[in-house]
Image: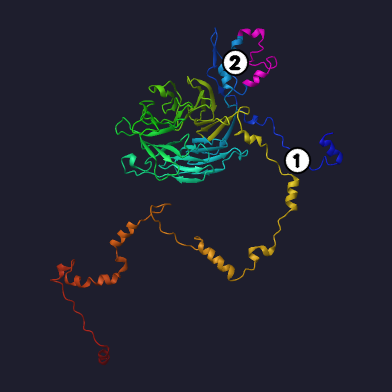
Amino acid sequence: MSDMDVFAAMGIGGFGKKTKQRQLDPNRFEKNKRSETIVSSSAAAIKTEDGARPLATPSAHVAPNSEEQDSDSEPGPAPPPPQPKDDNAGEEPEFDMSDDDLDQSHFPISHELILKDHTKVVSALTMDPSGARVLSGSHDYDCKLWDFGGMDWRCKPFKTWEPAGSYYVHDLKFSNDGQQFLAISGTTQAKLYDRDGEELGTYVKGDPYIRDMKNTSGHVAELTACAWHPRDPQTFITSSLDSTIRIWDVEDRRKQKTVIVVKSKERGARTKVHACAYSPDGGLIGGACMDGALHMWQTKSNFVRPSLSIEGAHAKGTETGSVVFSVDGRTVLTRGGDDTVKLWDLRSFKKPLVTRTGLATLYPQTNAIFSPDNKYVVTGAGASSKGARGHLLFMQKDTLETVKDLEVESTPVKVFWHSKINQVLTGLSNGQICVLYSPDMSANGAKLLLNKGPPRKATVEDMSDAVSAPTIITPHALPMFRDSEIGRSTKRKREKERMDPQKSRRPELPVTGPGRGGRVGASATQHVVQNLVRDTTRDEDPREALLKLAASADENPVWTAAWRANQPKPVFAPAEDEQEGQEKR
């Protein structure tokens, strides 16, 4: 006899009320399923003896289901090859699943989730290492933090702030442990935040009047990008338009550790650094410049000159969007502003291994990334006209040939593929963030929103509980009815209010040192100079000051000296006394 039978015999088998478990809808992911807008360039058309004829290619999320269906029950344009009919034997090559189609099914792009809160182009996008939070920056000057575990069906961020006022956000990077992140905007100072968006510090800016960039404590021009050291959590680099890449210590915000001055062969010997990156082992620092050059520095060197350099990597005068190292550290991927994506081999750093052209670049922050398995390259191509749809391209790493052409609502700018949750994030030019995932291959992330199920509706029992247990307030417990002891409580209250600067109306203290908060600061030298030459005109009586000059004005007049010789003398009637006047009357 089992334990449950014993409990039933004792009469305690049904003790208590069993909680109802919420059943999730098995078709809950269908509402986020993408429409079939995926176009495969490798299987766009099949040439036959009669000529080229277009082929309808199924999307990635339809291909696995089509293999399980029988050709007799599902007559379609692409029946599976295991059971072909005799009358279709001549068209059998048209139905074969190629290797490219098998590889396409590994892309987690069958479903999508739209995060819409920005109003302008998403220029910076990243995720924490765990894949729980999304960090985005935009040209609307805002940074936003999204949490998949805490979001509901409205998909709104839990924190929004402006890191640098009315400046564009250029780059955002989480640290390797995910506890803090860097925010790079159009200012000269990088900012450090914790994972909840609270500011931890601002790094110093340099002196713009110093010509030698090695002698400045920080950047003197607009920042463009940043990167964390892959192995040292206390080190990161920043690039700027002042022709430098600076290596910083997280704890030292007053001065950088090392300065890499990028020299150009153009006139002026300066250029603008638009992208920077660390190699996976931290041994190399890469930088792409405005003059089209691509440089590599050994981190153990003195950074006087680059270890590897190639001039004309991209077109001169264009802004390179990203520099990315592969997992093995042997190849480098660059996304140029000249509508190209190039793959470079560090062992023969003379010309690119392969070049892909014709990728429209509408925003300088457009980047390109490697897939987590290092087999594909993902980047965005701009829309051909205003209001047209953009393209998210999945390309083979070796040849840069398009494996998948995924249409999105507008121009994709930033792309991020998280290896842990296997989801692809894309920041679009219309302010949306498109999260691509697959219910089968992806884990957590965007799936958490639908795994929660619909919100529970309030029942009659909930309302009755609220009515049956009202809040009881005793009248004399309120402050307005409380009998306070005169003298003791008021004294403490006055002392407490005196410590409050707002209630006591205490004037603001003078700012010492450099100014802050819009107020101009003062130094000890300024007060000394003011006391040396002191203006005392406000302390004097104006009437007394004028009477001092009356005697000198009579003796030596300046304006009436010409009339002194012929000026008639005034003749006045003699004054009579009051007594004499009365006697005459």
Task: Establish if 484 lies above or below 585.
Answer: above
Q: Is residue 122 left or right of residue 454?
A: left
State which quarter of the image contains the C terminus. Answer: bottom left
Task: Establish if 357 lies above or below 363.
Answer: above
Give the prevailing secondary structure in the magenta stretch.
loop
From this viewpoint, is residue 122 visible? no
Q: Is residue 352 left or right of residue 582?
A: right
Q: Amino acid at mark 2?
A: Met
- Tag 2 and tag 1, C-beta contact below 8 Å: no
Residue 421 spot, x, y in % from top left: 58, 31
Q: Quadrant of residue 438?
A: top right
Task: Please give the residue where the numbered disc 1 appears in the rendered image.
Answer: 19
- Of 113 and 120, nearer the camera is 113
Residue 88 spot, x, y in % from top left: 64, 9
Task: Please give the residue where the numbered disc 2 appears in the rendered image.
Answer: 97
Outermost right residue: 9
Within 10 angstroms of label 2, few (less than 14), some, or many (20 or more) residues?
A: some
Query: Which residue sits at x=67%, y=32%?
Result: 28
Within 10 angstroms of label 1, few (less than 14), some, or many (20 or more) residues?
A: few
State which quarter of the image contains the N terminus. Answer: top right
Query: Which residue sits at x=18%, y=66%?
Result: 558
Circle 2: element type? loop
Outermost left residue: 565
Residue 396 spot, x, y in % from top left: 50, 21
Q: Which residues are magenta?
A: 63-90
Indicate which disc, 2 or 1, sits on the residue closer to the N terminus.
Answer: 1
